[in-house]
Image: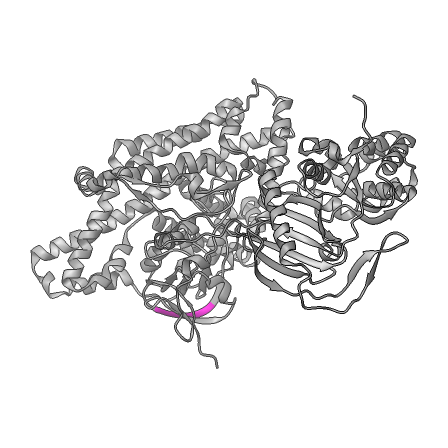
Amino acid sequence: MTQRMTGPLGDFGTADLADAGGKGAALGELLRHGFPVPPGFIVTTDAYRSLLTVTGIGAALDGMDQNMPDGGALRALFTDVGMPPAVRADIGAAYAALGGGAVAVRSSATAEDLPGAAFAGQQDTFLNVVGEEAVAKAVADCWASLWTDRAIAYRRRRGIDPREVAIAVVVQKMVPADVAGVLFTANPVTGERGEMVVDASPGLGESVVSGRVTPEHYVLDRAGRTRSFAPGGGEVVISPDARGGTVEQSVSHSPDPSLAEANLRELADLGRRAQEHFGRPQDMEWALAGGRIHVLQSRPMTALPPQPLRLNAVQRRVGPFFVEMFQERPYPLDVSGWMEQGILAMLHRMAGSVGVRFPSVAELLPEEDGVVMQLVPPVPRLTLRTLAAPLTLARRARQFNMADWRNDPRFTAFLEQVDRLNARDPEALRWNEVVGVARESFATMRGVTELRSSYMPGIFLPMLRLRLMLLLLGRLKLASALVAGAETMTSGANRALEQLAAMVRTDPGLADAFASSDGPALLQLVEKDPAHAAFREAFAGFLRAYGNRETVSVVLSSSPTWSDAPEVVLGLVKALLGQRPATADQTGAALSSLKRHPFLRFGGVRRQVLAAVDDARAGMAFREDSHFYATKVIPPVRRAYRELGRRLAAGGVIDDVQDVYHLRFEELEAITDDGGALPASVKQRYRPLVQARAAKRRELEGIPLLDTALLFKERRRPEGVLVSGSPASRGRAEGPVRIIRGPDEFGRLCSGDVLVCPYTNPSWTPLFQRAAAVVVDMGGLGSHAAIVAREYGIPAVMGTGTGTGILAEGQRVIVDGSAGTVRAAATG
């Protein structure tokens, strides 16, 4: 094909990204569709590649260390060589055809102005360039700006291969702006799609986009009507210089708006049209000159929060439970694999068994560009079948005896299938067979689903019966403490961890190692030192028994299990080395109080009430243990994913094994390897997809899945209370605050600390054996944390919403688990 060095701006559109770059393609598209874009031409990527080939720069770039490039040395290559004559002639002819005069020269790389990769400010722009020689030089400087240190670092952070990037240059008639700035077609701070935001300042828009001024700030509705206005700072005005280039000058500042209402309405109209055309909110640069608005650039908004939710009462009530599970943004493979076909499929099946429609995964976790944007607390929908739910539940409660669930043939079959999955070595399998391991794992999960559907009624009815009895006896407040003493896999794991801690305490060498090391260093010491063979064997046995336990959340297959992150377990052991604080036996005290009730002197009443306690405990144990056994499916799923990721990394499709989670399960199913290496088409199809989703995910790093203020906005704290929440375990305790944000920090907890954390799951509960009290941002009375806190007799306050943000590390506080409050302890 014949190379095309330049072309009129209107000849290009969104299909010409490879030739015109992101900025040029978007401007050409807008010009074609009647937007007021200044006329101009594009120096195409063919011209840039011609420079690389003719001058030998391309060979020099390939010879450099692309992992540690020197931006200064790379840019020097462009200044040391001349522009190829053919390119130089085409640029001169295009400039002449434009009519000469002042122009703006803007870089337009093929990787910029795209969803998830704006590259804002990474390449250079030159304003008010006058004369053919100056234009040619500005084009060359734009090419060189592809290799500035900041642009190189930006690409590296986003995993973009520098050899895959080319650069075009947009040359347009200069707009001598009276006022200029930026229009966002959605509120970039709140994510509100019903608002537009305009930042403006007198002179050229460079003062706004470079941050040289505090701009005038307008918040508009979709029609362009002003909702709020904040005057600018007027620090400086940048204007075209008659000799070329720009000048800065200080002017007297006016608090009045620079834009009339008609200007704002026109901007809003342009923004709406651009958003409708490109199909997503836009970040548009504009200039007002001689009463006319010109569009200088339009690109997708990046790092845009999702549309703010408006939660109803049901969503506010169930929201903390779901936020506790979704502390991390799920990957596409989490959603389409383990969640959709495993854990959430179980919720759908169980809800459906009583005629309740549970929202789909897409409704619960809406996506944009293949990445989860937010968590929408579900509102279960009742159907006609719900009317029959009481009868259905009663029938199942009679049919399935909770005490015998481990003898159910379905449970035996489930364990046998898990053993078969664990016996398969993914490395020895073909691609479709490895995918099949994951698929079989999801099918195996249905065994737990069926058990829960059958036996869960055995939880609700005994709990209801117990609460009715306690209500009649005037002892309803004892209910939570009475059922906390159930023996579960969680309590068994916690005792086993205590035994490991006891081994450490009795071995001076191990005790010193735990005192002086943590994390990977401690793990290496335990695994390698021959002196620690006995502990190593006991530790391995613990992981065999309990290593399937999740570290972060049961819904995320991307998060490691205890076996995948043994350093987390060692952190728990380290936390247990301190002396156990004195705690109240809430369960024992509650049972003693119940037994002293006068009515329990009658044998029949006593037997009925105590049997109700035992049945309720058995139900709680089933809930905890069926959760534990469900996690046994996660290790074979993770092994299959890891093997698929290894093969994709070997084929250059992804850079790291963990990047496999950026793909969806059905995309992995669609890949074939014909028993050998992956075909080249797999890399061509999936590598850009992975890079785009990874970039989108990085955009959203600072944006929570759900603003927890929406869940607790109506709560009022009593005077003198630092933090309040739901009372979850009775009693009062005083101690220093220890904020633990994730499993990697478990080893930081000291005996007697007040554990303050954003969420909990069963893997956190061993810490409760040393904590004086527990304060959690999320969760409620029935959460794992609350149940275990009552079992260990320590105060707990759940669902504070802001505990980790308000309380300070080391601050001495008093936790009142009965009132659900945290106050500052007296000093002095």
Q: Quadrant of residue 593?
A: bottom left
> What residue do we see at 88% from left, 54% from top?
242
Q: Residue 360: give x, y in percent of width and height.
A: 40, 39
Tell me if residue 735 is in the magenta stretch: yes
Please indicate whether residue 595 sits to the left or right of residue 739 in the image.
left
Q: Is residue 750 visible?
A: no
Q: Quadrant of residue 530?
A: top right
From this view, report whether residue 228 is shown above or below residue 397. Answer: below
From this view, report whether residue 682 is shown above or below residue 568. Answer: above
> What residue do we see at 50% from left, 33% from top?
639
Q: Quadrant of the N terminus?
A: top right
Q: Residue 659: give x, y in percent of width and height.
A: 58, 37
**How is this picture coloured?**
one colour
Question: Hey, which residue is sitting farthest top in the picture?
Answer: 674
From this view, report whether residue 97 is shown above or below residue 472. Answer: above
Q: Residue 429: give x, y in percent of width and height.
A: 51, 23
In the foreground, 250 or 718: 250
Q: Residue 483: give x, y in percent of width and height.
A: 26, 55
In the foreground, 628 or 245: 245
Which residues, given as a range, are shown in magenta?
732-736
Q: Is residue 777 visible?
A: yes
In the foreground, 297 or 449: 297
> What residue do we see at 74% from left, 34% from top?
10
